Amino acid sequence: MKKNAAAMPDAGTVSAMETEWIGKMAIRPGIGLFRGKAGDNHRHKHWAHQLSIGIGAPVQLTADCGTMQARALFIPANTAHQLMPGHMMSLYMDPTTDEARAVVSMMPASDRVAEAPAGLAAIVLASFGDDLPHERSFDTLRARLQLGALPARNARLDAVLQILHSSLDHENSPDRAAMAAALGMSGSRFSHWFREATGMPVRSYKKWLRLVRGIEQVLAGERLTDAAHGAGFSDQAHFTRTFVEMFGLSPSSALAQLGKMPRYR
């Protein structure tokens, strides 16, 4: 794996290599997949673990550790990075999902950008196929990751996650005090507990869930303005700023050439 800290470019520099994003996307609760040509993006970080696998050539990115290149790279949630343009398959996993827990358990190091084991990359590639992956492929991935062998889930965390996900369908999102009271905790203790259990501040996680909801609506054919309001953002500009912060490019640039993967028939 290639590492060269001195070679890290300025995230604001536009390279001649940078291109449009062209490919297919699919999203299920807690997990999403992109397959195609990754294009222009700047330094960013998001609240999902990312596993990117090169197609035809290695994946290359820059992060605080320098430039890294490998057939497959694992990028932990909340890790600033910039992908170099190229053909790839990228899996995005909410850290609270069983898929993420299984992937992390297969990584020799999951607290920093690292080369993913060949066996893990093979599981993902085999699950989604070489030509036209579809939404049923997520079920294949779950089976291949043997999720039933994972340790039991945290019941209290599952209860809070249920509240957070249900709140996406309502105008008023539960505040910290309400969620803390549901678990019999003080507000400060709840915040500490949630971050310890998930690696994320609860406020940031709520914002991430809203952003994912907005992406789902855009892929379903909604206009950016409608998707932003439907996901609980004050306006399209707020949605766009959040998208740029977490993906390194604007939603219009990212989603314009992307199609939704077909449903399984």
Image (tube, helix red, strand yellow):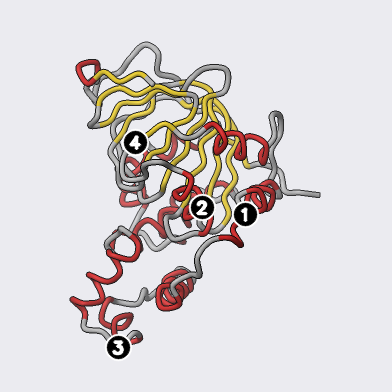
Residue of label 3: 184
- Identified by mark 2, the residue type is Ala
Lower position in the chain sequence, tag 4 or tag 3: 4
Residue farthest toward the right in the current orientation of the protein:
265
- Residue plotted at (27% across, 71% down): 193
- Give the label, 1 or 3, closer to the camera: 1
- Give the label, 3 or 2, closer to the camera: 2
Residue of label 1: 146
Lower position in the chain sequence, tag 3 or tag 2: 2
Is residue 238 left or right of 252 when viewed as pictured? Answer: left
Residue of label 2: 102
Using the numbered discs, state the Cα–Cα distance from disc 3 to disc 2 in whole angstroms: 30 Å
Q: Where does the image place residue 200, in percent across and percent down from the top left?
A: 30, 59
Using the numbered discs, state the Cα–Cα distance from disc 1 to disc 4 in whole angstroms: 24 Å
Q: Report crowding for label 3: few under 14, some 14 to 19, many 20 or more residues within 10 A (C-alpha).
A: few
Residue toward you, 116 or 259: 116
Lower position in the chain sequence, tag 1 or tag 2: 2
- Residue plotted at (49% across, 34% down): 117
- Identified by mark 3, the residue type is Gly
Q: Are marks 1 and 2 in contact (CB under 8 Å)?
A: yes
Q: Where does the image place residue 129, in percent across and percent down from the top left?
A: 69, 34
Q: Is residue 111 above or below residue 253?
A: below
Task: Kindly identify which numbered label has been placed on residue 113.
Answer: 4
Is residue 77 left or right of 141 when viewed as pictured? Answer: left
Secondary-structure class at tag 3: loop
Using the numbered discs, state the Cα–Cα distance from disc 4 to disc 2 in whole angstroms: 17 Å
Q: Where does the image place residue 210, in percent across and percent down from the top left?
A: 41, 59
Q: Are marks 4 and 2 in contact (CB under 8 Å)?
A: no
Q: Quadrant of residue 67?
A: top left
